Structures are given as structure tokens and as C-alpha cells.
Image (spheres, rainbow, N blue to C red):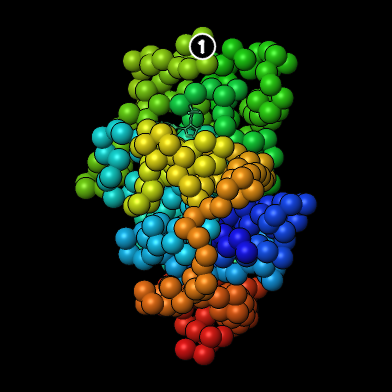
Amino acid sequence: MLHVAVVGSGPSGVYTAQTLLEHARDPGPPRGEDVRVDVLDRLPCPYGLVRYGVAPDHEKIKSLQNNLRTVLDDPHVRFLGGVEVGPAGVSPAKLLEWYDAVVYCVGAAADRRLGVPGEDLPGSRSATEFVSWYSAHPDAADDGFVRDARSAVVLGAGNVAVDVARILARGADELRPTDMPQAALDALAHSGVRDVHMVGRRGPSQAKFTTKELRELDTLADAEVVVDPAELALDPACADPGSLPAPNRRNVEVLKEWAERPREGRAARRIHLRFFLRPVELLDRGGRLGAVRFERTAPDGAGGVRGTGQFEDIQAELALRSVGYRGVPLRGLPFDAESGTVPHEAGRVLRAGRVSPGEYVAGWIKRGPTGVIGTNRPCAKETVNSLLADVRSRPLGGGARTRDPLDGLRSLGVRPVEWTGWESIERAEADLGASLGRGPVKIPDWEGLFAAADKAEGR
Ligand code: NAP
């Protein structure tokens, strides 16, 4: 029997488990019935960024959980939540003793830094922290993100920037039907933020957001999108969008349409889309953020920008830095600090340039934090192809394993949350929502999650 551990139950982990089952059913060993996959997660809840990263108002993308569920519910797959791999839990070396192969699908949990003065002022936060808070991640702190803020700056022009700008600009009535935790909903319902400035350092034709997400900004109940035609005119590509790749062209067409229409000025909140402004400093006003200083940039003719020596301050009591995620090193695994990924060859982990037998990676920790959820399918496929080719050409790992890794975990004092525990959390979230007159509402803290899981596991 081939027994594989997948570390991480986000899309890349679940697609890896799914692909292992599908491909193992091909002729030749191992066959489907010979494959067992344990999907380990630090959290007692599965689905990774689908649960803790996809915005709560994106119900359609969130419903992808139903597809992921069928994989984790497969009799050949076992979900083991609440299991930390690393110094505080089980080591990669131990996993290699227990399993024939280990696939790390741990994503990119940290955020990139701006590297400018004032970045750590109170009021300046990473978008990752804000997303974790409104997604009820149990590590998130309620740091009063929107308290006393009237103007917010979102730094970056990717889809995460669009997500956080949209959540800041939505009204409580739009957020209440989501599974957002009650404390975040209450805070956003009382938010005084009226202006949200989303600012890209390059031009509109180079923004990273996708057109569907951009358009959605114009559908909010009580927010108006503001685009300055003069700023679009700074981008030569805006005069001739026909020559741009289709995704960029569509973005430019939407932005031009918005820039040309008359302002209504009636909405409670405004989303300002700004371009060619590079953040150079976050300014202190009485011990906390008061404004963000930008240098005006101009196209350098090679896809980048250069500074112009002109500066503009945008007043803001809240800045959300949304300049990309970053992988974090996992002790016991090699790590390339430059790219924030684990060095690999077609998914096989490389230690000092050589393939480390039995160790694999997939997802963002393999290729960096880019692409949509579906990008993880081909990524997982490549890794699983490598793994199965290795299994078919030589035995993996250290020989016969008779012990159930679950016993090994218990011997380390780890009591994993199994699938029934997760189902119990789901029921508790439905009950919590019902008590608040809402649909299911996420439990935001470790104690609450483990208490709900324990109900199923009789602890
Ligand atoms: P991203 O798409 O890489 O965007 C990062 C943004 O930060 C870019 O606009 C980048 O500008 C800017 N940036 C980087 N360094 C900067 C600096 N020092 N100063 C100012 N700006 C800087 O990253 P993301 O938004 O975190 O998204 C990560 C991935 O998740 C993406 O593939 C995204 O599509 C995906 N995602 C998808 C959805 C969805 O489908 N609804 C939602 C959320 C996330 P430059 O282009 O100039 O580098």
C-alpha cells in the first residue's frame, strides 16, 4: 500500500489528493485501492485559502468547497486537522518515517513588505491580516482596522487589493448574508470609512486585477467608483488598447468607460482607482498613520516605471498593503528566501541541489503566489506524476510500515481533528448563525473551533 501525507488542505493539497487517487487508478501499481492519503492541516478546518482567503461575498467561488469536500470525504482519504508540521508539532523527518511520500502544499502564508519608512505605524496593516480578520482565521487579531478611520489607502493593484477595497466599501446589508464573523460584521457596519483609494505603482494597462473583479466594484449598493481621466491619459496604452493582451485591454476599456461618465456624487462611499503612484513613505500624525506619500511615476518604455520627482500625499488613517503573498520557511525543509519557495524539480524537493526521495511540493510553496485556484490542478498533476513515476521505478521511503501514523501522532501528544470533528464545527457554525438570525457564521477562535470539534469526538 502506498501511504501519502499531504500537508495542507487548501486547493493545492486537495487537488494533489484527488490527482493521486485518479492517477493511482491507472493500470500498473499502485492501484486505487492501494493508495491512502492523509491530508494534514494546522487548522482544525479544511480548505485553506478557500475558507480563509476567498472573500466572504464571493459565494460562487466559496461553493468550490463542495468539490473539495467530495475528495476529503473519499474513503481513501483521511483529514487530520489541528496537526502542525514544524518545530511545535511533527517534523518533516518524522513524516518521512511514517509515510511513503509527503507532499507539502502549505501555500504562502506571509505578506511581502513594501520596504518604505512608516510601514509599521499603527494604522498600516497588511491586506493578509485584514483578510484573515474578516475571514475568521483563528490567528487573526481584532485590531480595530476601521476604528476612527475615514479614509483608507489600499496599496497594490491585484485581486487581493480589489477584494479588500470592496469589503471596505460594502454596506452591512450586503455583508450580513455572508459567513463573516459577527465581530467583523459589527465593526464594518459601524465603519466611518468613506473614501477608499486603491493605488497602483504602474499604469492601468499593467494592473494585475482581472476584469470580472474590477467590474464588481461598480455593483456595490452604496459606493461610487471614481477614475480620473487625466491619470488614464498618462498611460500611452490607454490611447490604443487594441494592441494590448485581451485581459489588460478589457481592464482599460472598463476604466475608460468609468472615467468618461459623469460623477453622481450621491453614494455614501467612494472607491478611487489611482495609478502611476509609488508609495515612498507612510506618514506619522500624532503617533499613527495620517497619510501615505507617493511619488508620481511614468512609463519607462520597457514595461516598468521611473520616478518623476513629483510627490502626492493621500490622507488615510488606514493603509492596507496588498503587494503580494510570500512563502514562509518550514523548519526541516529547504527554502529559497529569494523566491519564497521550496526548491524543486517537477515537484520533487531538492536538498542541496539533489532530489530528496519521498518529498514533494505543490501549489504556491512550489511556484510562488500567483494564479487562480484552478492553476493548482496542473501544478498538482505535475507533482503527482513525479511521485507516481518514482513509486513505479523504485520503492520510496524506508521500507515496510505497519504502524498507523495516527498512533505516531498520538504518541507525540497530538490529537487530530478528524472529518467527524470538522462536520461538528460546520454544525456549530450553522447553529451560531441561526442564533444571530443569519446563515452559517464562522467561529473565529481556536477554543471555539476545538470545542465544537470535541463534541463529535467525545472529548
Ligand atoms: P498580485 O496579483 O501579484 O498583485 C500584487 C500587486 O502589488 C501588483 O499590483 C504589484 O504591482 C503591487 N506591488 C508589488 N510590490 C509593490 C511595491 N513595492 N509597491 C507598490 N506596489 C507593489 O498579488 P495579489 O493581489 O496578492 O494576488 C495573489 C494571487 O491571488 C493572484 O494570482 C490573484 O489573481 C489571486 N487572487 C484571485 C482572486 C480572485 O480570483 N477573485 C482574489 C484574490 C486573489 P506591479 O504589478 O507593479 O508589481
Q: Nearer the viewer, residue 426 or 213?
A: 426
| Residue on which disc 1 sits | 302
**From the viewer's perspective, is 41 left or right of 388?**
left
At x 52%, y 46%, the residue is 361
Q: In this view, does 201 lie above or below 11?
A: above
**From the viewer's perspective, is 212 left or right of 153?**
right
- Return the x and y of residue 439 as percentages of the image width and height: 65, 73
Q: Can residue 67 be seen in this view?
A: no
Classify mark 1: residues with Cα within 10 Å, few (<14), some (14-19) or many (20+): few
At x 48%, y 17%, the residue is 304
Amino acid type of disc 1?
Answer: Ala
Q: Nearer the viewer, residue 397 or 180?
A: 397
Splitting the image into 4 quarters, where does residue 285 fall?
A: top left
Q: Is residue 263 above or below residue 424?
A: above
Residue at the outermost top position: 301
- Return the x and y of residue 142 as percentages of the image width and height: 38, 63
Q: Is residue 4 visible?
A: yes
